[in-house]
């Protein structure tokens, strides 16, 4: 009889523990602005990267984003959620301006004709709420160009080889291309 009670007691404890643990394992709803990254491997697939940019991809969802939801002339986190981060594994130039290898947050001030791209030393920030202009280490102005297609989600990509490349940004019907060398 005592053995049976012990077994039932252990079974009850295990059931309670499993029930409590199952709540901890619930998956919350998926993020509407999923995390993404672009890796710059100028020497080809499987080689050491030169840079990596980590950001979240906001969606239009029927809204006008640039100029309305993302206002012109104001600092924007260059994506959604946490501030966009770039990791440079070697010294590079963006728009002809040198930036040392390291980790930076990247913001933008979008306008109709050009965007100002801001590389900032204040890391691990949320959105543009903690943006500190005094921590800018590089500012580059790049023209906006119209795209032949409209994009639902904001995206970034690298291209290039032989010492030259671009960091491309696209959303809605615009593209911004930052020339880079390494």
Image: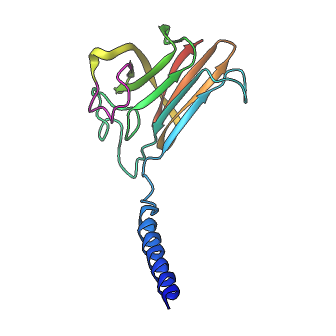
Residue 72 drawn at (x, y percent): 29, 30
- Residue 36 lies, with reference to residue 10, above or below; the image says above
Residue sitting at 41 percent across and 37 percent down?
Answer: 79
The chosen color scheme is rainbow
* Residue 142 position within the rendered picture, expressed as x and y whole percent measured from the top left: 44, 18
Task: From the image, give the main secondary structure of the stretch colored magenta.
Answer: loop
Q: Nearer the viewer, residue 121 or 107?
A: 121
Q: In this view, which residue lies farthest toward the front?
A: 2
**Nearest the camera: 178 or 151?**
178
Q: Position of residue 126 (x, y in %)?
A: 33, 36
Name of the residue lying farthest toward the bottom: 1
Total numbered labels placed on residues in the image = 0
| Residue at 44%, 72% in the rendered image | 19
Q: Quadrant of the C terminus?
A: top right
Q: Which residues are magenta?
A: 120-131
Quick check: is 121 in the magenta stretch? yes
Would residue 38 be counted in the magenta stretch? no
- Observer-nearest of 173 and 6: 6
* Residue 64: % across, % down: 35, 44
Q: Residue at x 65, y 20 (%)?
A: 160
| Residue 139 vertical position relative to residue 86 in the rendered view, above or below | above
Q: Which picture quadrant has residue 110?
A: top left
| Left/right of residue 77 with respect to residue 177 in the rendered view | left
């Amino acid at each position: 009889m005592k053995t049976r009670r012990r077994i039932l007691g252990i079974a009850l404890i295990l059931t309670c523990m499993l029930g409590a643990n199952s709540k901890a394992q619930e998956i919350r709803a998926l993020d509407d602005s999923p995390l993404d990254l672009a890796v710059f491997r100028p020497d080809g697939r499987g080689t050491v990267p030169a840079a990596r940019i980590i950001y979240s991809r906001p969606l239009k969802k029927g809204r006008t984003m640039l100029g309305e939801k993302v206002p012109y002339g104001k600092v924007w986190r260059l994506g959604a959620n946490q501030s966009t981060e770039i990791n440079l594994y070697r010294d590079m130039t963006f728009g002809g301006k040198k930036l040392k290898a390291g980790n930076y947050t990247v913001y933008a001030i979008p306008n109709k004709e050009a965007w100002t791209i801001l590389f900032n030393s204040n890391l691990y920030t949320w959105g543009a709420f903690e943006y500190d202009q005094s921590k800018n280490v590089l500012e580059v102005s790049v023209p906006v160009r119209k795209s032949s297609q409209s994009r639902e989600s904001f995206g970034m990509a690298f291209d290039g080889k032989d010492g030259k490349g671009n960091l491309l940004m696209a959303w809605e019907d615009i593209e911004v291309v930052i020339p880079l060398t390494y």
